[in-house]
Image (cartoon, coloured by chain):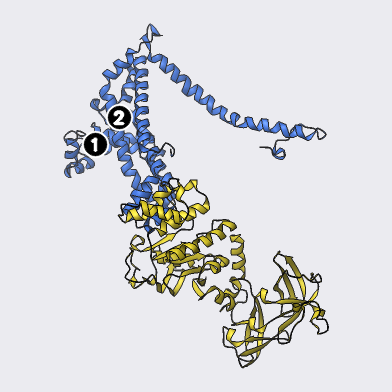
Chain colours: A blue, B yellow
Amino acid sequence: MTAPAEAPPAPVPPSEPAPMAVRRPPLRRALIPYWLLLPGVLLLLVFFALPLVYQASTSVQTGSLEEGFTVTWHFRTYADALGEYGPQFLRSVLYAGTATALCLLLGYPLAYLIAFKAGRWRHLLLVLVIAPFFTSFLIRTLAWKTILADSGPVVETLGAIGFLDVTGWLGMTDGNRVLATPLAVVTGLTYNFLPFMILPLYTSLERIDPRLHEAAGDLYARPAVVFRRVTFPLSMPGVVSGTLLTFIPASGDYVNAELLGSTDTKMVGNVIQSQFLRVLDYPTAAALSFLLMAIVLIIVTVYIRRAGTEDLV
Amino acid sequence: MNDTTAGGDVRLVGISKTYGDSFTAVHPLDLTVPQGAFFALLGASGCGKTTTLRLIAGLEDPTTGSVFLGDRDVTGLPPYKRPVNTVFQSYALFPHLSIYENVAFGLRRRGIRSVKKQVGEMLDLVQLGDFASRRPHQLSGGQQQRVAVARALINHPRVLLLDEPLGALDLKLRRQMQLELQRIQTEVGITFVHVTHDQEEAMTMADTVAVMNGGRVEQLGAPAELYENPATTFVANFLGTSNLIAAEVTSVSGGEIAVTAANTRLRLPAARCATVPTAGGKLLVGIRPEKISLSYAGDTDDTDTDTDATATVSDGRNRITGTIAASSFLGVSTQYLIDTPVGPALEVYVQNIERDPRLTPGAPVTVHWSPDHTFGLDAAQDIGAGVATAAGSAGAAS
C-alpha cells in the first residue's frame, strides 16, 4: 500500500519533499476498490433494486388498465393470490423439488466420474455437459415434446417395463400418457437444469485432495465408507450450491409447464406470466412474484441451516 | 488388526513396479525391515522410494513380487485391510473433521465405540491434548504433522509408514520433529519405515538406511556404516560429501593397497575397498572432507614443528600438494577447495580451533590424511553419481 514506486507517475516535481509523494498515492489507491465496485452497484440499483421497489408498490395498488392503478395499500391482494393459487404454489415447490432431487441423483455420479475417473477425457466431458446450451432453451424443451410423444418409443418402453404403472400410482402420469402430465414437466425441468447441478458439484469434487481418499482407505475405510465419511461431506458446498442453482430457477420456471404440461400442471410461473401478459392484473402478478420469492427464501434458509454449510457456501 | 501372531517384519520379495510399459519406478527388489526398526528409505526424488512405501501400504499394486507382514502375504489386500498406517507427505488430514475425529477415524472404522480414552492418550503423546476440538486448518504445520502421526499410530499398526513427513516444515521445526518421532518410536516400539530425500534426516533418525537410486537399493546398512564404507559412488556422493580420486593400483599386499594418481602415491586398507583390486587395475579412492588435514606447504618439512600438531605430517600419511582455490568460513569449520594434481576442487573441512592466517586462496598447501580413513570404490562407475542430486535435494531441503 505504501510503495510509491509503483504508483502512477504523479505530477510531482522532483524538488518537492518526499513525504508529499508518499502520502498522495495511498488515498488514491484506497479509492480504487470503490471505483471498481461502481458499475456493479449501479447495475444492481437500476435493474434490480428500483424494479423491486416498483414491483412492491404495484403489488399494493388497485385499479384497472383503463382507469390506471393507484397505491391503496391493498394488502388483501396477497391473501387473495395465495388463496386462489395455492395449488400452483404447491406444484412449483413440488416439481422443482423433485427435479432438484433427480438432478442430484443423476448429476452426482457424473460429476464424480468427471472429477476422479475421467483422466484426459475430463475437459471433453465438461464441454459435453454444457453443450446443450448451444441450442435454444425453447428448442430443447420442444424436442422433449417429440421424445415424450404418445405411442412414441420412449413412452412405449416405459409402459412395457411397468414404469408408467409406478409413476401413475404416484400421480405423476395418467394412463399411458407422459406428455401433459407432471412427469413430463419434471423431466423437462430436470433436463434443463442438470448442468447447473453438475458444474458446482464437479468444482467442489475436483477440489478434494485425492490423498484424502488414500488416507481414509489407509485408515480402514472401505470405498463406500470413504465416500460417506470423506468424499460426500467434502462435496457439500457443491451439493448446496448445485441444489440452489437448480431449485431456485426451477421453482420460478413456466416454460416447461407451458410446453410439456397441461392445465392441471400449471406452476406459479405460468400464473404470473398470464396475470402480467394476458389478464393484465398487475397487482396480483406482482404479489404472486413476491410470494414466490418469500417462499423460496424461506425454503432456502431452512435448507442451508439444515445442511450446516453456511461457512462453506 | 492387533493380532500378535507374527512379528512386524516387513518383507518385500522380488517386488517391482512398472508404469505403462516403459517407466520402471522400482526394479525387482528384496528388502527386509526387521520388527521395531526405524528404517529409512533415502534417495533423490524419482528414485522409487515413495513407490516402495506405497507398495507396502497397498496404495499401489506391484507389477511383480509379494509383500509380507510377518508371515502373512498381504500383496492382494486393499489398503483398508492392511495392518499398516501411513503418515502422508502433506498430512492429508480430513479438513471437515475436528482433530479429535481425525485421530478417532481409524478406530471408528474398525467399529470401536469407546474411543475417548485412546484418542485422549494419543493426543497427549503428541502433546496436542488442548487442540482436540480444532479443525486442521487452525493448526500450524508442525501441529498438523503431529496429528497425522497420532491418527496413524492410534491404530497400533504393525508398521508405520512415513512419506517425507517433515518435508513441509522449516529447518528448526524439522529438527524438533525428528527428535519427537524418535521419542515416539522408542515409546511405542512400532516398526517405522521413513521415506526421505534428506540424508541428514535419514542418518539422524534411522537405525538402518537403504539408499535408493533409479529404482534400486544401492546400499543398505547402519548410517555410520554407509557413511564410512560407501559401496558405490552414488552413496559416497549422496550421503555427505566425498572426494573421489581416480587412481591406478600399483600393489596389493598384506591387507594394504597402494595406488598412484598423478604420480602421487596413496595407500588404503584392502578391507575398506568395495571391490577386489588387482595390481595395474583402476580404483576410485575416496576420502571424506572432514578426515583431511590441511597444512601450509612449508610446514610439512621436518624443520618447522613448533606451531601445532596438525601442522606436522607424520610419515605414513597420504599426502597431496596443491593450492587453495577457495575458502568459506562456516563458523564451526572452514571449508576449503584445493586444486591438486589428482583433481581440482578437493574438499577439505577444517575445524576452527586455531586458524592459520596463511591459509587463504592461492596459498600452497599440503593435504594429508590417515590411510585408514581412505576407502576404495569400483572405478567402472560414474565418479559424479549422486553429486547433483545430493546438491539438489540439499537445496530443496533448506
Q: Point out residue B229 in the picture as x, y percentages from the top left corner.
A: 58, 79
Establish if A295 lies above or below B79: above
- Callout 1: residue from which chain? A
Residue of label 1: A149
Of A40 and B275, the residue lying toward us: B275
Q: Secondary structure at mark 2?
A: helix
Q: Secondary structure at mark 1?
A: loop
Of B388 and B85, the residue lying toward us: B85
Residue of label 2: A93
Residue A91 is labelled as: none
Q: Point out residue B38 in the picture as x, y percentages from the top left corner.
A: 47, 68
For the residue carrying disc 1, how many other residues have a C-alpha within 10 Å: few (<14), some (14-19), or many (20+)?
some
Indicate which label's residue lies in the foreground, 1 or 2. 2
Looking at the picture, which amino acid does disc 1 mark?
A: Ala
Which residue corresponds to the image point at 42% horizontal and 47% vertical from the top-left? Answer: B98
- Residue A155 is left or right of residue A17, and the answer is left
Of A219 and A57, the residue lying toward us: A219
